[in-house]
Image (cartoon, rainbow, N blue to C red):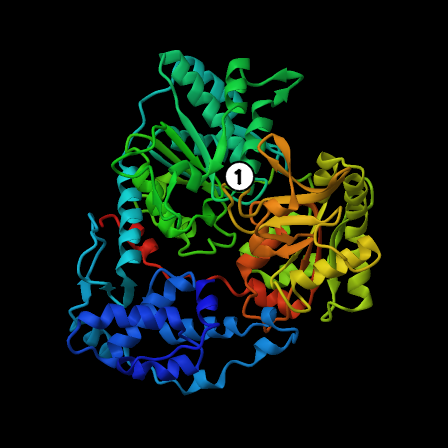
Amino acid sequence: MTSSIAHTLVPTLAPSLASLQPWVDAGVFGVAELHATEVITRSDPQPTPLLHLGAALAVWAPLHGHVCIDLGQASLMAYAETANSHDSHDSDDPDAEATAPSAFETLVWPSTEQWTQALQASNVVRVVSAVDPEPMLDAHPLVLNGLKLYTQRQWVDECIVATSLRARCGGTSAGALSVGAEDLLGRLLPATELNPATHEHDPNTQHQAARMALSSTLGVIVGGPGTGKTHTIARLLAAMLVNASDRGIPLRIALAAPTGKAATRLREAIIAASGATEGGKALLPAEIADHLSRLPTTTVHRLLGPRGPNGTRFVHDATNPLPHDVVVIDETSMVSLPLMARLLEAVRSDATLLLVGDPDQLESIEVGSVLANVVDAARLVESPLHRHVVRLNRPRRQQAGSPIAPLTDAIRDNKPDDVVALLRAGANDAVTGLPLLTFVEHRDPNSATVLAAVRAAVSAPCAASLAAALDNRATDALHELTGVRVLCAHKRGPFGAETWNRTIEQWMLGHAASTRFYPGRALLITRNDPRTQLANGDTGVVVAQPDGTRAAFRIGDEVRLFAPAQLDSVETAFAMTIHKSQGSEYDTVVVVLPPETSPLIGRELLYTAVTRTTCRLIVVGTTEALRKAVQTPGSRITGLTSALASAHP
């Protein structure tokens, strides 16, 4: 993250910041935090060491994904992140992360009472007790709310999100559906459905989600992979389109996701749902199915229209809102707090906003955990969001009897014994006898047992993709690569994606790669590129052509070819980090767990990795690592849940 870049430089302390030297020596603060602290505290005529420490931590927090610093947990937060920065993804020593910097143990942290008193006395700190209904940037660069200390920018964004979501809970839709739309909704998403386990008709949560979305300007539909979130959205949109058509009014729909890869998957799912049949007959009227299949999908940034090089200012905002009547955001767990604030500013107050995603996945790699905060707040009956969040629980994508669903349930529900038992028991396909769930229980990723298991899983898809790439069959090469992916918590080191990429290259080619763009190389774009329209997270493959190699990527409905020189930021992607796999699915997933001592290990990380598979899962690691992952939930510090939880702001 940003802080890791800053910490590669050797910080030079200004004399006024000498009190922060122990935190610099312990690896907590880098250049970014120190420079910002000097600027923030400059207007205080008598800045104290406690103000300096608070300001530095308020800047430090968003660099590590937190919205603010909790003064009561500051030492624990800093310790976890400092250990993380020494983790073995920057080293080939698997035990490098086991030893925390000894300098950290000598740090003397102030009491919260002393700290809050010092902050309250400073003229650069604004003290508040609740969310600002109309947040504004003023002369106070820091904001203190109880024990939570924010930079002003993070506080304003949190207030915008909290205020906007609460206001939307009071908004209502245009009214009752037309007769035709009501009939279609009843057929597409009936109020009850047969439970195959009990053979009784249960309430259909997909129907409940649609009803919720139709009655308000805010709908939040969450659930794990395969629970029918996109299926519900597609059929809900169909009913909305019929309703608009019957009333003779246009309905402008926007479909977006945080990444290009997630946007592409959303489009594919909408197209598939629009062509659904039952008994050989199309479920949707032809004109509605055609309308849905032609709806474009885009990234949230592109929807808002980025203005300027840093991508934080947009064409559409509160003064120039989006023209759409319905805005659907998929994979909302990946949307950061600042981006959500800009989105909420840009969506018309009378438009319907549908947020869709899985709150149990990894949160945004940037700041905040908005979707998880929303879902947590909605659990409370007194929260205005209580009736605006519907969770879909019934697995629908994986075949009956798939072992993946109970495994993900056990991970999410913090049941480490069940997770270990399910993996050790394994599971095979009832028809083919092929393994669906395999646990390679080993501590050494270089062991013959581990290498044999991973090679058996990746060889056939990689060989098929290579053959297609050599034969200039780009579409086939791309398709074959969706057959398998190795997912790692770490980027470097023996447990890391870079190591596994080199190993798989050696297996596939029979030798180490002699050139970067060899036919069959799996590619991952790591930065948005408006010139090529490739987005961060897009995956491709190198194919051979008569005049040289080209990189093939699927953009929308077409496969496009690029010269290697056109690609600025690209990595090999036979293996990738779990973070970068978000929004993707593969037939077979191999999860390489780091040791239990790794600070990267956690419940959301394991859950995200496991839920990338549509069929077969192989987990490599130890039971200790599994237990540690299941029992270690994420802990992003924000104030959004409490701001959304109460009946009154």
Q: Could you say where residue 344 lies in the image, as x and y percent from the top left?
A: 33, 41
Relative to 186, is 38 above or below?
Answer: below
Amino acid type, mark 1? Gln
Judge from the rendering whether residue 320 lies leftward or rightward of residue 30; answer left or right. left
The percent position of residue 631, horizontal first and vertical second, equals 54, 65
Residue drawn at the location 21% of the way across and 56% of the way down: 130
| 396 with respect to 312 (left or right) | right
- Tell me the quarter of the picture where residue 211 sits: top left
**131, 389: nearer the viewer:** 131
Residue 497 horizontal side relative to residue 367, left or right: right
Residue farthest to the right?
Answer: 510
Is residue 607 something one can see in this rendering?
no
- Name the element at disc 1: loop
x, y percent for residue 284: 54, 18
Q: Position of residue 189 (x, y in %)?
A: 51, 26
Residue under numbered circle 1: 533
Q: Is residue 510 in sight in this rendering?
A: yes
203 and 255: which is toward the camera: 255
Q: Quadrant of residue 105?
A: bottom left
Spot the residue most to the bottom. 106
Rendered view: 489 above or below 97: above
Q: 67 and 509: which one is in front?
A: 509
Q: Is residue 51 left or right of residue 187?
A: left
